[in-house]
Image: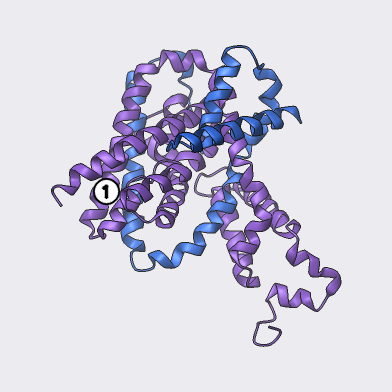
Chain colours: A blue, B purple
Amino acid sequence: MIPMFTLIVLQLIGEVISRSCGLPIPGAVIGLILLYLLLWTGRINSDDLGATTGFLHQNLGLLFVPAGVGVIAYLPMIVDEWAILLATILVSVVATLAVTGLVMSQLARSESVVAEPAEGGA
Amino acid sequence: MSTGLGPLDLSSFLRHYPFLEFLAVSPLLWLALTLGAYIAATSLYTRANKMPLVNPTLFAIAAVVLVLSVTGTSYKRYFDGAQFVHFLLGPAVVGMAVPLYRHTALIRRSAAAICAALALGSLTSILTGVLVAHQLGASRELVLSIAPKSATTAISMGISERIGGIAPLTAIMTIFTGIVGACLATYVLKFAGVTAWHARGFAMGLSSHGIATARAFQEHDIAGTFGALAMALNGIATALLVPLIVDLLGRYW
């Protein structure tokens, strides 16, 4: 219970900061920064939160389902342009993945993180 | 209301059974549908040898949409139940501080690579999005709506509004971007020869925010951590870069 409480309170504080300062950054991201500072300064032990955050992150894909379903409500907006939009997204995502991945792997050569990904992930 | 509706209209069907009527109003049914669809999609994904194209988020969304359209249920009613799942996104994002903190040493060692990959990746995402859409004949509003698509939904919609895009359209583009990234990242990165977990995760989170980061967390803890880092950093970079780029390009178009 306490780990979940900690995460919610930090998001709440982040939300208040984001709104009162008119920042373009969502409250949850500010909550993330606050939690990082609390972990770094030793106010919170990462072992106390690890099980809860690990569970949330292993099931992160589930949390996007309701918002993803919401997109369907707006689909009529793109009936005329769906081909343009899909083509744009395909080209842009593939280019961005390749550029980001290549720049990152060329510049950082730390042996410890070079692992052969298993076929098909996992 | 009882006439003219198909036999599959769930709420009118349930109205004939007062005992069950509470189901259509209670959030329980839609919460159970969301979880059930995700569990089914995950088992399909496992049975497909974890093939990235069989993305559990994509298949769960498709299953829920199918049920909603067959039963004639409005999105609003569905979301009344499903919002409990949606709500957990906030705490999940806050909680990303834990893996980031645990991998602080690695992040610090790759700081230069992170900065370069962030700058070039973010520029690639915005420029290819804007230029390809423009070349294909998209309207100005559409181009503006697509520009911030790689940032997480809350940020991309905010940017879109500020630069004169259409926020709901940006939400669609953002979610599509996430799903396309989650489905294709494994293949693209393999083709490009990117094998390091941190580079793979960073590319996924930067190009396709949380939905691809979910995929990265399933690949490897380090991939997920760098996905989360890229997602947070690119949210900020996109908020700074998109208005500048749009302003610059606006002078030539």
Q: Is residue B13 above or below residue B217?
A: below
In this picture, residue B70 sits left or right of residue A102 = right
In this picture, residue A17 sits left or right of residue A54 = left
Which x, y percent locates residue B179? 47, 48
- Tell me the residue at 66%/53% (across/down): B82
The amino acid pointed to by label 1 is Val
Whether residue A121 is visible to the viewer of this picture, yes or no, is no
Which x, y percent locates residue B122? 33, 35
Q: Nearer the viewer, residue B186 or B27?
A: B27
Which x, y percent locates residue A77? 40, 65
Q: Nearer the viewer, residue B168 or B52?
A: B168
Label 1 crowding class (10 Å Cα cut-off): few <14, some 14-19, many 20+? Answer: many
- Tell me the residue at 30%/51% (across/down): B144
Q: Is residue B46 above or below residue B168?
A: above
- Tell me the residue at 63%/57% (across/down): B79
Where disc 1 sits, the SS reads helix
Quadrant (top left/top right/bottom left/bottom right) for the N terminus of chain B: bottom right
In this picture, residue A106 sits left or right of residue B19 = left
Chain of the residue under label 1: B
Q: Residue furthest front?
A: A20
Q: How many marks?
A: 1
Which x, y percent locates residue B37? 66, 54
Q: Residue furthest right?
A: B19
- Tell me the residue at 34%/23% (across/down): B115
Q: Residue furthest bottom?
A: B3
**Residue named by callout 1:** B130
